[in-house]
Image (tube, helix red, strand yellow):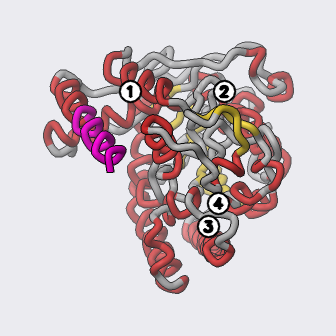
């Protein structure tokens, strides 16, 4: 009870502070070294998706500690909104295989001018800017597989354009495609990567619904999202290739013995394994309760599905298999609707077979680490037929 009261009070203080901060905030982004200026309009890349594409929590320095979360909050409110944290080259996983000799920032488009104009007063602007700033502090975009793929294809860092966003689902596809046009372009880039993992079933209430209802809602939402994206599907003169990744098997991530054996530093626990973190074998203090609650609320249906709850895990796996089948049919429909080579989609289903190991997830035991992103990038470069023409 005391812990929950303190959590509520801290939340109120946080919201008040953020509202005061938002009063003085204007429109943010695009940001990078060159703003919305592309170096080569015939050789650039856009990345669409959720926290699986942003490099979320991939910094090895981002530990699950109360002081880290407090510092993150203070720097989000008071820090420079466009300050980027770049990984050090010596900490980057085998950069030479991606042709990386120097790590330079990509270009980030947090939201479009239309999204800003449609924001509902100060609260709407607060939410937009809060998301933009948190992403800059929580994520290391240059650790993402999209950045590595772009560099491997000899695309300049500034021409790798991230429009993806943490915590969103497929309904955000139209808005993300609209953000691409903030780059002073009349068309889409020659290459787009699309990846959505789990946000469309993250709510724990998913277990109260039938599989049929959940998949039907997803199918309807996905079809509607691409219908609303239609005005933005203006092919590049050289053609636009859109590579859609099948949702990564999150059940494999939270049950994989090698991942569960990975050791992380957690508030009040010292160094424990991801298995101990996920199975609730924790010592509780007020600070550790806050940190553990934050970790477990990232994607409750997944992060709170304990290994012992086999029924929930089977249900989640069924959902992802159905979602994957729906994605595959949607891509087939889009290819039939839009004659290649002007616009061409590819569905990379085999990525579901990718298996993570110790060190492939970040300190939150959920999101990919830089090494995990490198494993994804390698797989995509080797298995995507549409990327063959880009090499």
Q: What's the magenta bit mostly, secondary-structure-wise?
A: helix
How far separated are the C-alphas under marks 2 and 1?
18 Å
As drawn, 93 above or below 389: above
Please tell me the numbered disc located at residue 185. none
307 on left or right of 339: right
Q: Choose the circle earlier in sequence order: 2 or 1.
A: 2
Secondary structure of residue under mark 3 = helix
Residue 121, position in %: x, y?
14, 40
Secondary structure of residue under mark 4 = loop
As drawn, 277 above or below 220: above
Q: Which residue is mark 2?
A: 60
Which quadrant holds residue 146?
Answer: top right
Which residue lies at the image location 85% right of the left edge and 47% below the top edge? 382
How far separated are the C-alphas under marks 4 and 2?
24 Å
Q: Which residue is mark 1?
A: 73
Magenta part of the chain: 1-14
How far separated are the C-alphas under marks 1 and 4?
30 Å
Please tell me the numbered disc located at residue 247. 4
Residue 52, position in %: x, y?
60, 46
Q: Which residue is mark 3?
A: 331
How far separated are the C-alphas under marks 1 and 3?
39 Å
Density class for disc 1 (Cα within 10 Å; few <14, some 14-19, many ≥20) is some
Residue 218, position in %: x, y?
49, 73
Q: Nearer the viewer, mark 1 or mark 4?
A: 1
Q: Choose the circle earlier in sequence order: 3 or 4.
A: 4
Q: Choose the circle earlier in sequence order: 1 or 4.
A: 1
């Amino acid at each position: 009870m005391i812990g929950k009261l303190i959590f509520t009070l801290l939340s109120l203080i946080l919201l008040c502070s953020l509202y005061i901060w938002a009063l003085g905030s204007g429109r943010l982004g695009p940001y990078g070294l060159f703003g919305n200026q592309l170096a080569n309009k015939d050789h650039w890349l856009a990345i669409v998706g959720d926290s699986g594409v942003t490099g979320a929590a991939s910094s090895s320095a981002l530990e699950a500690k109360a002081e880290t979360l407090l510092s993150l909050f203070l720097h989000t409110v008071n820090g420079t909104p466009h300050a980027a944290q770049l990984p050090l080259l010596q900490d980057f996983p085998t950069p030479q295989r991606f042709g990386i000799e120097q790590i330079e920032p990509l270009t980030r488009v947090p939201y479009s001018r239309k999204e800003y104009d449609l924001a509902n007063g100060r609260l709407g602007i607060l939410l937009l800017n809060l998301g933009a700033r948190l992403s800059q502090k929580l994520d290391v975009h240059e650790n993402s597989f999209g950045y590595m793929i772009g560099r491997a294809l000899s695309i300049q860092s500034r021409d790798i354009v991230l429009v993806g966003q943490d915590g969103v689902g497929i309904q955000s596809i139209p808005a993300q495609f609209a953000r691409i046009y903030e780059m002073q372009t009349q068309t889409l880039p020659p290459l787009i990567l699309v990846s959505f993992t789990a946000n469309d079933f993250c709510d724990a209430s998913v277990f109260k619904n039938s599989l049929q209802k959940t998949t039907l809602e997803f199918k309807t939402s996905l079809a509607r999202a691409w219908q609303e994206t239609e005005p933005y599907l203006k092919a590049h003169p050289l053609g636009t290739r859109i590579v859609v990744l099948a949702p990564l098997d999150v059940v494999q991530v939270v049950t994989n013995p090698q991942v569960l054996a990975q050791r992380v530093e957690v508030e009040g626990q010292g160094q424990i394994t991801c298995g101990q973190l996920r199975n609730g074998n924790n010592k509780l203090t007020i600070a550790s309760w806050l940190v553990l609650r934050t970790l477990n609320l990232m994607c409750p249906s997944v992060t709170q599905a304990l290994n012992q709850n086999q029924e929930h895990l089977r249900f989640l796996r069924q959902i992802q298999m159905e979602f994957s089948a729906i994605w595959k049919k949607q891509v087939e429909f889009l290819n039939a609707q839009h004659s290649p080579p002007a616009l061409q989609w590819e569905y990379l289903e085999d990525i579901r077979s990718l298996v993570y190991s110790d060190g492939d997830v970040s300190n939150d035991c959920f999101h990919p680490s830089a090494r995990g992103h490198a494993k994804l990038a390698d797989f995509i470069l080797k298995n995507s037929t549409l990327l063959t023409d880009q090499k």
